[in-house]
Image (spheres, grey):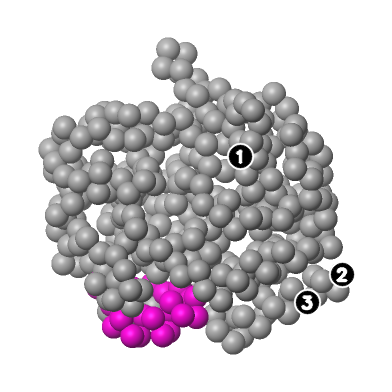
Amino acid sequence: MEETETLQKLWEEVRDLSLGTTSQIDRLLFPPSPLHFLRDYVSPNKPCLISSAINHWPATTLWHSTPYLLDALSSSTVSLHLTPTGRADSVTSLPTSPSSLCFASAHVEQLPFPDALSKVLQSENGSTIAYLQQQNDCFRSEYEALGSDCEPHFAWASDALGWLPDAVNLWIGNDLSETSFHKDHYENLYAVITGEKHFLLLPPTDFHRMYIREYPVAQYHYSQDKREFQLELEKPVRHVPWCSVNPYPSEEKEKAEFPLYFNGPKPFEVTVKAGEVLYLPSMWFHHVRQSPDSRGLTIAVNYWYDMRFDIKYAYFNFLQSIPSSIHNCRKVCTEPCSCISKDESNISAPLLTIDDTNDGEQR
């Protein structure tokens, strides 16, 4: 287990030298200057929570009014993601083979905003859970009627990074929606407007703790007539690498399956409240839950800035190519097999190509 001991030393040193040894991240009472942001957070790839950055946005008051949203978006058609569990773009069991796992994406419908919002508010666990999101710069397309309620970018971040956001996305959901561990190749500024978002964060150096494996891709299909979901594998079969760890397991045996995660350093825990902004550096693994406001809604806007593919990227690419002794299965499965079976406790990760994990999931 020499490789694992070496990795554990890396995880400890990163925290001792840069990130800190507690589960908390830096909190800034006011937005940083471009130099402060670049020097102390972007360059060292270090997250922070920022207050007083969006207090001047009209959205922070207007979006607490449902009638305002319904009126402003009365003629807008938006993308609504539907699942039976609230966990789209995550690992789940195949109904036809419960011991085998797949990567399941949501059923997506295009609906008038008033109808879509109604479905979010009427979501029921175990039945149909709706989430308004679409990671295609949707705030500047589907929700352009709300554009004047938020700044088009964070000036201090744009100055520090050297460019404007590549995409701006809007998220409207409730406490039934949850986001599995994943990472993005963007510098992410995540602004919560109503409700709260609860993040678990792990730095890129903790790659091996995520037990990234290849899963066959499946998609939910929802029948309005039968009011039920079907989960179907894509044909021809396609695989994506994805994080296997559920940080809130229902059974102890799940913890035993992922010892590097559960026995390693604790993840950073961050609650982003309404009016706050999280800087989530590129390539950081994050899991997200949310708490709604009094209406039952959580609303957020995030700004994706292109990351710099510099020496940090090269280091990470090298790190993920290092096999761990418990990550020794590298086969690419064309059918469900033991390397992605819930009954296997010694499952191992395939090598991950760096661009493969930027799929569209709830964030």
Residue 58 x, y percent position in the rendering: 14, 58
Q: Say which quarter of the image contains residue 16.
A: bottom right
Placement of 334 over or under 190, stated as above or below: above
**Amino acid type for the residue under numbered disc 1:** Phe
- Identify the residue position indicated by label 1 in the image: 103
Label 2 – label 1 distance at C-alpha? 30 Å
Name the residue located 40 percent from the left edge and 69 percent from the top edge. 279
Q: Is residue 14 left or right of residue 126?
A: right
Q: Earlier in the sequence, mark 3 or mark 2?
A: 2
Q: Say which quarter of the image contains residue 4.
A: bottom right
Residue 356 x, y percent position in the rendering: 58, 51
- Identify the residue position indicated by label 3 in the image: 6
Q: Which residues are magenta?
A: 31-53
Q: Residues within 10 Å of mark 1 (few under 14, many from 20)?
A: many
Name the residue located 56 percent from the left edge and 74 percent from the top edge. 312
The kind of secondary structure element at disc 1 is strand
Residue 335 x, y percent position in the rendering: 75, 32
Q: Earlier in the sequence, mark 1 or mark 3?
A: 3
**Amino acid type for the residue under numbered disc 3:** Thr
